[in-house]
Amino acid sequence: MMIGPKAYSAVVLAGMTKEEAIEEIKTLKNSIKELETALRSGEETGEEFYPKPQTRLSAFKEYLAEAKRYFKEMGWEEEFPEE
């Protein structure tokens, strides 16, 4: 089971420094790219595990949006390219 975006913000993002938030955003972007590539190419994506790859992809996208919101809410200048 994965946590929702608001819980992700409260549990994972809360208290992060600017540098930690940037790293979290980079990690989420990489995870999203890897899952999208694997799903497109038919690579093994841990299909036998739960949550399913498509569910993880959807959650990671929601987490990314929440991480970007947190970053802006903290008043930090954006240092990562928008996609």
Image (cartoon, rainbow, N blue to C red):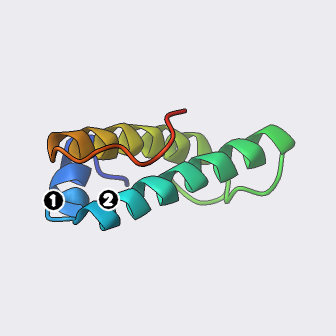
- Give the numbered dot on residue 56: none
Q: Which mark is residue 14?
A: 1
Considering only order in the chain, which callout, 1 or 2, is on the residue closer to the N terminus?
1
Amino acid tagged 2:
Ala
Q: Quadrant of residue 57?
A: top right
Q: Position of residue 16 (x, y in %)?
A: 21, 65
**Residue 24 location (% of width, % of height):** 40, 60
Q: Are marks 2 and 1 in contact (CB under 8 Å)?
A: no
Residue at x-position 55% and y-position 32%? 83
The secondary structure type at the circle numbered 2 is helix
Determine the secondary structure under disc 1.
Answer: loop
Disc 2 to disc 1, C-alpha distance = 10 Å
Q: Give 31 or 49, whichever is nearer the viewer.
A: 31
**Residue drawn at point x = 42 percent, y = 63 percent:** 23
Identify the residue under disc 2: 21
Percent across and percent down for residue 7 are: 20, 50
Outermost top residue? 83
> From what the image shows, is residue 42 above or below residue 47?
above
Going by the numbered disc 1, the residue's amino acid type is Ala
Q: Position of residue 10 (x, y in %)?
A: 15, 54
